[in-house]
Image: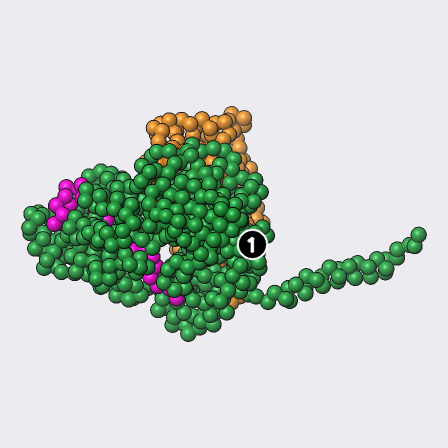
Chain colours: A orange, B green
Amino acid sequence: MLRFIAIRLGRAMITIALVVTFAFIVLRLSGDPAQIILGPEAPPEAVAAFRKAWGLDDPLWLQYFHYFGAIIQGELGRSMRDGRAAIELVAERIPVTLALTLPALAIKIGLGIPAGIYAALHRGSLADRVVMMLSVAGFTIPSFVLGLTLVLIFAVKLGWLPSGGQDSWRHAILPVLTLGIGGAAVLARFTRSAMLEVLGQPFIRTASAKGVPWRDVIVGHALPNAAIPTVTIVGFMIGTLIAGAVVVESVFSWPGVGRLLVVAVANRDLAVVQCILLLVAATMVTSNLVVDFLYGFLDPRLRQNPGKAS
Amino acid sequence: MTALTRRAALQIGTAALGASALPNFAIGQSDNRPSITIAVQKIVNSNTLDVLREQSNVGERVFFTSLWEPLIGKDWLGNLMPRPGLATEWKRIDDQTVELKLRQGVKFHNGAEMTAEDVVFTFSRERMFGNSEAKNRSTIKAFENIPAPRPGKELPPEIPAVARRAWPDLLRVDAVDKYTVRFYNATPDVTLEGRLARYGSDIMSRKGWEDAASYLDWARKPITTGPYKVVEFRPDNSLTLEAHDEYWGGRPPIRRIRFVEVPEVPSRIAGLLSGQYQFACDIPPDQISDIEKNAAFEVQGGTILNHRLTVFDKNHSQLRNPLVRRAMTHAIDRQAIVETLWAGRTKVPAGLQWEYYGDMFHADWTVPEFNPTLARDLLRQSGYKGDPIPYRLLNNYYTNQNATAQVITEMWRSVGLNVQINSVENWSQIMQRNDSRAVRDWSNSAPFSDPVSSIVNQHGPNGQQQQIGEWSNAEMNQLCEVLETSTDRARRRTAFRRMLEICEREDPAYTVLHQNATFTAKPKSLKWKASPAFAMDFRPGNYV
């Protein structure tokens, strides 16, 4: 097991290093942060002073060397926009984003999985078709369209909820719903497919033939076997908790990590972008690790042969 | 000792609670001024409220007239001409020196009185100029005398450079007495009063600076004289201002102003219509009629001190011949752009100048006439063979930018010009110097009421266009010297006229497309007037 964890962690570190390197090269080659941050009307001498102060005149390889060296020492750099530590800026935004993404995750799981199971158990019925129709709609409607539609209905027409901002829990309702509905639709489809596949397996027929009550067949045999693809999707969703709400945060003016990322990329504020990417990569890698362990818990065959889980 | 029963404790507690609540209630009742929320696309770009660091249109909106005030103000609700601000009067001592009498009784947000000491500090090395030096004529040479960044409360590196650009030859400011200051320039300069009124020459409290723990702490909550003071600034999110009741211009009409950042246009409009915001700014022209279909709302605003330009790189192989650039200027139907893309809510100005230049304004000057026949003829004379001319384009950095680019590209095509749009992502890519740079978009402002603030500062020898190697012209550069140094107004006026002829007709550096405009939506029931600028004026008398 230790070897398994060590290999996974090693791969995770390589992944993170590649992400950081790739982002550094792409961002630095595609624009000069000094000109972008100071704007088109900035006097040339101001741009020059800014470049000198932030070491942007150094060769790219030297900048990368300095940057990567600092990361290894735990220093994630400072924002070129206001000089604050990048990690401080990002840390301020994480709880703001989690205030949306965690309740949204609860909606995705609490709504999507039961709906998928129900649809699978009533395959071909009117209920199945309604669930799948709603699922396809939720899956295909872009989040900004769904978000603006909800705003039009609940903020503009009915006046029940605020259209944007982050002043109270009421401001979170529409963005949470926007995020939650789309994710629930995805989970419902995956859960239904997984359940249908399992329900068609011989061991389900065998259990039924042996007189096991249908409820026990579902709970004891079908659900655990159908859980693996669902857990994979949920794991992916957990991986996007930190920066998976970029569009929704923009539509609802929610000042979370997603908006910080948009602003930082637009300004080529390298340290902030890198810091967010590091966090996202770390979250994704961690959630993948947890999912891998869950595979073993859900399927004893994988516990006996961990290589299959990869 | 008397035992305290539960009943007695409850009574005391209730009485104490009531007593503590009553004064607050009374205060709340006495201040019945409204609080408002304003949705903007962006509050500031620099994450600070430092008027020298935030050099942007969006910054102007939150700074003026709410926070920052200069010695010589502007008529924000009129024609933007100079008017007394924190100084009540001023006079020339000589061609290089201006003396100003300060308004007495002006209180900063920290309660301290503004004196000459604060003015001197505002224009000090510690606050403005760092290690940079005044140059004995013309604007400073680029890349010289830029102080190295220092930790703590030292200035960000770009501030001295920006300050020197605004005050290239300022030697020092002296306090003559508590309420009198003198500005000494290294050379004669007729624009000193204009520079005193410009963005960036606004007065701050010395004590406010000294009390702040760091530059960033100060820059997020600057202590100034404006009618509103900073309560809270959350970068990229919101800025909350509160009435400064000791404001010298009277009691501010609004108790609390909250600017919130709402990046998406539909979200700003939805918030306005739902009543969440009282003002929605940065409304694109194509949304105005939709908003005004609702009889309860209106869109205010209009032209501002900023012109949209198309800029030429005369070093590009296809544009070396000025006849090609001249053809481009005559092929554009600017009025059609104003009518179709701006719903007629802006105008085609008289070249790169503004009426508030006063006697320096040339009312009879116009942009090159729309004349496709002349454009074709000029192209024929130039020997242009139809080779591609690249046009670097940002994605709607300016309002209607993409649509305007597509329209004028087709207008150019119709006279035989093969201009090809090349979309890029940022200003760095726009300005990158190589063979694919020929045409780009830009806008020019006039920070003070003299052509030095625009045509010299932007297109002269130290202006961006020449600094990045797009364009230069020997005669133009000599004329810039005249405009900057001469005190003979007639000579300056003639020089400016000649500069317009060179830059817009003979050897085009740019061509003006239209005046820029900004639009703000609000309920009709709110009595408020937009100024002809990005600035939003909420001083006494302009909000009911």
Question: Horizontal and vertical percent for residue B52?
Answer: 43, 45
The residue furthest front is B93
Q: Residues within 10 Å of mark 1 (few under 14, many from 20)?
A: many
Residue at screen point 50% across, 27% down: A73
Q: Range of the magenta residues? A: B300-324
How many numbered marks have been drawn onto this rendered protein structure?
A: 1
| Residue B448 belongs to the span the image colors magenta | no
Return the residue nearer the eye: A290 or A173.
Answer: A173
Q: Which residue is mark 1?
A: B107
SS at circle 1:
loop
Residue at screen point 51% across, 67% down: A159
Question: Horizontal and vertical percent for residue A62?
Answer: 37, 26
Return the residue nearer the eye: B257 or A275.
Answer: B257
Quick check: A159 left or right of B328?
right
Question: Horizontal and vertical percent for residue A18?
Answer: 40, 32
Return the residue nearer the eye: A291 or B481.
Answer: B481
Vertical arrangement, residue A67 with respect to residue B381, above or below: above
Quick check: B505 left or right of B139?
left
Vertical arrangement, residue A88 with respect to residue B9, above or below: above
The residue furthest right is B1
| Res A185 seen here | no
| Res B356 seen here | yes
The quadrant holding residue B73 is bottom left
Q: Amino acid at mark 1?
A: Lys
Return the residue nearer the eye: A81 or B497.
Answer: B497
Question: Horizontal and vertical percent for residue A249?
Answer: 46, 52
Quick check: B39 left or right of B145?
right
Residue at screen point 33% across, 64% down: B286
| Residue B303 belongs to the span the image colors magenta | yes
Quick check: A74 left or right of B469?
right
The residue furthest bottom is B295
| Circle 1 chain | B
